[in-house]
Image (cartoon, rainbow, N blue to C red):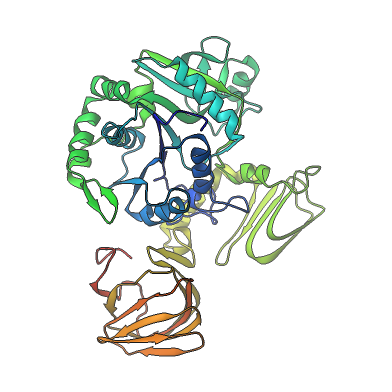
Amino acid sequence: MMIPDSVCPVVLCGGSGTRLWPLSRPKRPKQFVHVTADRTLLEMTLDRTRAMCGRAPVFITNDDYRFIVREQAQPRYGDDVDILLEPMKRDTAPAVLLAALHAARADGVETLLIMPSDHIIEPVEALAAAVRDGLASLDDDTVCVFGLRPDRPATTYGYIRAAEEGRVSEVAEFVEKPDAATARTYLESGDYLWNSGIFLARVDALLRAYKTYAPEVFAATRAAYEAAESDLGFLRVPADAYARNPSISIDYALMEKIPRRLVVRGDFRWNDAGNWREVRDLNLTDAADDNAAVGRSELFECRRTMSYSTDKLTVCVGLDDVTVVNTDDACLVISNAHLDKLKSVLETLGDRGLAEIDSGTTDYRPWGSFTSLDIGPRHQVKMIRVKPGERLSLQRHHHRAEHWIVVQGTALVEVDGEERLVTENQTIYIPLGADHRLTNPGKIPLSMIEVQTGSYLGEDDIIRLDDIYKRSEDEH
C-alpha cells in the first residue's frame, strides 16, 4: 500500500447540496450520482482510499444515506466498514470528532486522513505522495492540510495563504471564498492555494485540540458517542446528546485556532464537481469549443456548452456558454454566467412546493428502488427493483389495491399469511387492506411492474407491521 495502515481514512458523506440539480437532489446528493460515466463520486473516493491504504474507512453520514453508503462501500470493503450516523446536521467539527473518538478505540490507528466524499482527485499516486510528506511533517500538535496551486481566479473555493515556498510550509491564514477581484489578486500573488478540504492529523493531537479550542463540541460529541448504539450494522448516535453541539465547521472550531498548521502543496489534479461548469470540464468531448455531450446528447455549432441527458435525446444547436441538463422529470437550461444563482432559484421553486426540487421519479430504499412511470387521479404505475436477498416490510394500505407483474427474477409474495412464488410474466393481485410482503429469494435482481389503483396513492398510506430495517412510520 502507498501509505501506512496506521492511517485511517475518514469519509464525510452527509452533504445534501443542490448545485448539480436536477441530477443531484437532497434525497440523492452529488456524492451518490454519476457526474462522469463510470462511477459515482463516492465510489471514486473509495477506490482512491482502497488503492492508498489497506485499512477500511470510517464513514460519517446520516439516516437518509446510510444504506446508499453501505451499498457503494460493500463491493470494495465487504462488511468491514464502520458507518456512524449523525442524527442531525451540525457541520464538520462534530462529524470529524465522532470519527476521532471512534478511531481512538481501534487497534493500530494513529492518524486520520479526513476527506470529503464528492471530489475527483487524480492520479492517486500523487495524492499518496502528498499524504506521505504530510505524515513526515506531523508532530504532536500539528494539523496538516492539502492545497493546490490555482490555475484560475475561482470564487467557489476557500484559499490557504502559505507562509513560505516549498512542498510543506506553515499556514499563514485560511481565507473564505473570495469575490472575483480578490480571487484574481490571489492568483497573481502566487502565495495562495486552493483549500482541498482534505487534512491529516494524529488522533491524540486532534482530541487534545478539541478539548482546548472547542470544549463545548468535545463535551457534547463525546457524550453522544459514548451513548451510541449498534443498529443493523450502523453505529447510531443519539439525538438528544448530539443536539447540544453548536453547528460549526472544523475550520472555525479548530483550524483558525491551532498554533501550528502545515500545508502540503499537492501536485494532483483536483475538482470538487461543485457546479455544472466544473462537470463540463470533466466531460469534454470537444476540447476545441469547450463542449461536453453526456448521455443521449448531440451538440451542433455550440461553444462552451454542456448537454447532460440521462435518458431523452437532447439536441442543442447554436448555443454559447449554456448548460442543459435533462432528466426524466426535470430540465434545466441555464446560462453559465448565472450558475451561481441556481441555488436561490431552487429555493424560490421549493417555496412553491414543487416536489421535483427535492426528489426525482426514482426513490431509493434499503431493499432497492422504485421509479414512478405514470400517475393519474386514481392510478400509479411503478417499476420496482429489489436486490437479491432483500425484503420489503410486511404492510397494508387503507386506500389502494395493487397488481404486480414480474418482468425479471422471482418474487416470493406473502398475502394475508399465504406465500406464493411469482416468476417472470406472472402476476398477482394485492387487495385493498391485505397484509402483504415482497421478498427477492433469488441470486439476480427482481424487477416488476406495480399498478396501483385507489382513492389515495401517497407513500404515507403504508402501515408497517414488520420491517427488518427498523424504519419508523414516517421514514420510507
Nearest to the observer: residue 300 or residue 56: 56
Q: Can residue 142 be seen in this view?
A: yes
Q: Where is residue 421 in the image (x, y as percent from the top left)?
A: 39, 85
Nearest to the observer: residue 82 or residue 362: 82
Query: In the rendered view of the protein, which quadrant contains the C terminus?
Result: bottom left
| In the image: residue 152, left or right of residue 469 | right
Which residue is drawn at the image coordinates 64% and 60% (left, top)? Answer: 309
Q: Where is residue 97 in the image (x, y as percent from the top left)?
A: 30, 32
| In the image: residue 409, left or right of residue 154 | left
Nearest to the observer: residue 418 or residue 324: 418
Please, is residue 247 above or below residue 331 in the view?
above
Q: Is residue 402 visible?
A: no
How many numbered badges does the structure rendering display? 0
Q: Position of residue 450 (x, y in %)?
A: 44, 81
Which residue is drawn at the image coordinates 65% and 17% (left, top)? Answer: 188
Which residue is drawn at the image coordinates 68% and 47% (left, top)? Answer: 283
The quarter of the picture where residue 260 lies is top left
